[in-house]
Image (spheres, helix red, strand yellow):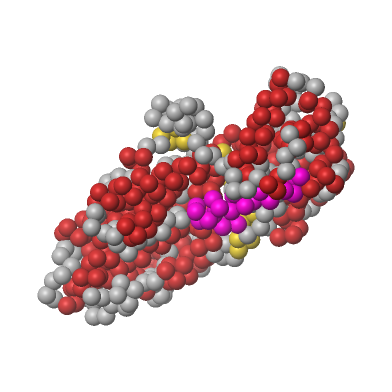
Amino acid sequence: MKVWFNPSKAIESALSTIATETEGFGLGFEPGVRPADPRFGDYQANGVLGFAKRNKANPRQLAQRLLEAAQASDSFDPALVELSLAGPGFINFKLTSAFIWQWQLAFSKVEDFQSGAKELKHGRKVVIDYPSANTAKQAHIGHLRPMVIGQAIARLLDFCGADLIRDNHIGDWGTNFGTLIMKIKRDQIDLSQLGEDALVTLDQLYKDGSALEVEQPELRDISRNELVLLQNGDASNTALWDQIVEISKVAFEKLFVQMGVEVDITLGESFYRDKVQRIYDELSEIGLAEESDGALVVWHDEVKKFARNNERPFPFNIRKKDGASNYASTDLATVLYRLEAFQAEEIVYLTDARQQDHFQQLFLTTEKWFKAKGYAKPQMSHVYWGTILGADKKPFKTKSGESIKLQELLDEARKRAFDVVTEKNPDLDKAERVEIAESVGIGALKYADLSSNRTQDYVFSWERLLSFEGNTAPYLLYAVARINSIFRKVGVDPEAPIEGASQAETEAELALARKIMGFVTALELTLSDLRPHFLCTYLYELAGAYSSFYNADKVMVDDDAVKARRLLLCARTRTVLMTGLDLLGIKPLERM
Ligand code: ARG
């Protein structure tokens, strides 16, 4: 029997194969394998119960038959997996120490883990839509989560075998350009002369322009006209727009580098401007969209809040009264483009929670439209998140009530981490402390964001996120550094194969070994609902299991075989911790 990377999946598939040939089952039986109460085993199959009920059969007898067939098959070597019957018809699976140890031997390097994990998404074409900020505005704290969560999910999907396209759906075609161009022309600003802080100036120009429109409402017509000119391809406005887009791009790329954000393509909202007409045509033709007050809208009567007869009408507005396209039409054109140009099988969107209605309407509309046209609808999901709060439980802002600039936040993270590192390790030379602070500071910022359940708000606290205790990046980074120091002491390369190890047998060794195997389940869980905090929790528990093992069992013992197996467990813990941190976008350190 081969040692499975993912025991739960392997048991599941072996059991359904066996069931098809076992009397009383046949096709259509779902084993229902899940992690079990550790007192009874590692996994439990409970599918016999529902199956027996549907077929009016005796569940215990059926389970007994299946158990015997499983024991007789090659899939379950009794030296590796013990099977037993329990309760009204459960089958329990207990992995023996021999299995656990073979697993540790078989899965040693990142590539081994990855080759197992690749089955989870096996080549599926996935488009991930992030971080999709808007041009002409400086990035602020609100951009932290799309970058951090987006990057982690992208890395995870990639690791688990998705054929991934990271598409930055940047907002570069909004109504704000009218105001901005009005103000630029009015002040006769030469954008090419703005220099380093060009985006800061643009940001300010837009704010001033909007303020001016409030004072002198007649300016709104001018702004609106500038927008219409831009949308109709006017040469001078297009030239201004090109410059604005370029300035924003340069500024964002600077942040992307610091945050480790990778994108494969940037197809902004402007890219779809000549692709929306087809949307109006197709949605009208199939009777899904209708005119309402001059606008083009889609109703979803089956959902109360989007229904026609709701007292506060809230249709999916796909074309404005003045004929202009909008966020919704652009997004519909984008789905079609992703299907036709990329053959997307799955699309993952990332934005904050305030856009839930938009995506719900987008998904419903796509569903009906694609069905009517016979297009293959990709699976679509909206990954959203809550707000970052200050200590006062209100959205985290500067003391004067402004939004915190992302660059300032990153700089402060580095500075604070540097102070912490210096306090812990005053003797390290400065260059090394700066390097450590980079990983600890930015890593801590990311980890705080990832380790809370994304759909909830979380309270931002420098003290907590930079603490070396608890579920934090410094704690996990330190765990890796500590393992590295053990290997330095023994003079062994942690990446090199470890020979002559005997099989793990103490309670702490086996508990740690089981926890290491739990990486697979953690990946599965994290992927299933795209919630990185599951992976964080797992890594934190792994570091805890490692600590218990380290306190209970000495590594540096005289018996070479015991020493080797303990070093092997250290090496595996290190690999899994480093792989996990890397998936979260955090750079592990040799020492701290
Ligand atoms: N730029 C948008 C915003 O700032 C986010 C875009 C999300 N992606 C999408 N396909 N709608 O809210």
Residue drawn at x 17%, y 77% is: 560
Residue drawn at x 21%, y 56% is: 548
Q: Quadrant of residue 497?
A: bottom left
Question: Of residues 189 and 550, which is closer to you in this image?
Answer: 189
Q: Indicate whether 181 appears above or below 75.
A: above
The location of residue 260, given as percent across then percent down, is: 50, 56
Q: Indicate whether 557 appears above or below 232.
A: below
Q: Is 63 displayed left or right of 180 in the figure?
A: left
Q: Indicate whether 380 appears above or below 483.
A: above
Residue drawn at x 65%, y 45% is: 194
The boundaries of the magenta stretch are 240-263
Q: Quadrant of residue 574?
A: bottom left
- The answer, for residue 253, to whether it is visible in the render is yes
The location of residue 503, given as percent across then percent down, is: 23, 73
Q: Quadrant of the C terminus?
A: bottom left
Question: Of residues 426 and 87, which is closer to you in this image?
Answer: 426
